Image: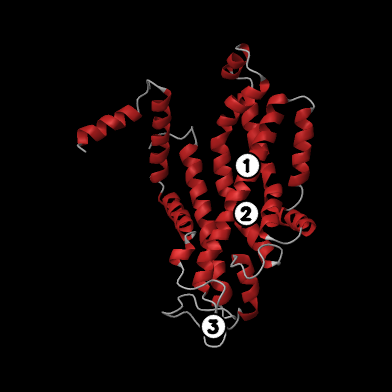
Amino acid sequence: MSAEAIQSRRDWLLSERPASRIQARLGRAYVAWRRFSANRLAFLGLLIIMLLVVAAFADVLAPYSPTIGDLKGSRLLAPSAAHWFGTDDLGRDILSRVIFGSRWTLYVVILVAVIAAPIGLLVGTVAGYAGGWIDPILMRITDIFLAFPKLILALAFVAALGPGIENAVLAIAITSWPPYARIARAETLTVRNSDYIKAVQLMGASPFRIVLRHIMPLCISSLIVRVTLDMAGIILTAAGLGFLGLGAQPPLPEWGAMIASGRRFVLDQWWVAGAPGFAILIVSLGFNLLGDGLRDALDPRSGDQ
């Protein structure tokens, strides 16, 4: 593609008077991508998350089985060319278990985001737009959830529901929605009395339609940033539940459970607990870097760079 064609497309995307909604949306997406790509740390975070997604294809990438080991000849081997991360007390390859464990990490963060974010968005927008007695009731319920430490509250829910990865996901989602509700309510209060919303009301739109079609989309960008930044905390909470035996159950290769089984050997065979702990560190760092980059890229007050 010639330089003139590239410049022409760039001018079309950055036009101050877009001819259609599609052009306006593509222009905003292009500007946001330029801001994001200019942040090298954010790009590093995106690369880490992409590696996590690729690692979900563990059947192709893992060199060994995550559950079957050689107890007689491969128990607690140090990292080597045959086993890059060493082996555990049951002779299983730790690298393969870490790769397979990325599936469960991805499973947890996606399900928690899918469950918690819509709940918080709905509660926050309804409270902010309805006002009256609905607002304080919904916000006091939110404050009750925020008053408890997330891990302690998740432990209580898992203890009531029973151990297991599905119950752990549900418990984490139940404890994760309140911050999203507060953000959505703040955004709703900002735009509730704007001329844009007043015009929609004069056209006869119902409150349900106004909240669903006109207010919720305005809260999405802030919610995406907060969800991305919360992913590190969600991963640590899931790992904490697994470490305490309330999350994924053996022989599933969940990172928190792997650290729990390896804590007995941490002084002499440090790699058994060190490898999954390092994986948690890297993925949590990646989500934090990605969230910081998205916050800068999606901030409408940021100037074009």
Q: Which mark is residue 234?
A: 2
x and y percentages locating residue 258 in the rendered image: 61, 70
What type is the residue that disc 1 sits on?
Ala
Report the mark closest to the observer, 3 or 1. Answer: 3
Mark 1 or mark 3, which is nearer the start of the sequence?
3
Q: Which amino acid does label 2 sit on?
A: Ile
- At 48% from the left and 73% from the top, the residue drawn is 64
Q: Are marks 3 and 2 in contact (CB under 8 Å)?
A: no
Q: Is residue 288 above or below residue 252?
A: above
Density class for disc 2 (Cα within 10 Å; few <14, some 14-19, many ≥20) is many
From the viewer's side, name the closer residue of 30 and 66: 66
Horizontal arrangement in the rendering, residue 198 relative to residue 64 (left or right): right
Residue at 48%, 41% (x, y): give it.
296
Count numbered badges in the picture. Answer: 3
Amino acid type shown at disc 3: Asp
Q: Image check: 24 left or right of 191?
A: left
x, y percent for residue 289 = 49, 51
* Element type at mark 3: loop
- Mark 3 or mark 2, earlier in chain: 3
Give the residue pinned by disc 1.
117
| N-term-proximal mark, 2 vs 1 | 1
Residue at mark 3 = 70
Q: In the image shown, does 228 or 247 lie closer to the viewer?
A: 247
- Crowd tier of the residue under label 1, counting other residues whose Cα lies within 10 Å: few below 14, some 14–19, many 20 or above: many
Distance between mark 3 and mark 2 Cα atoms = 34 Å
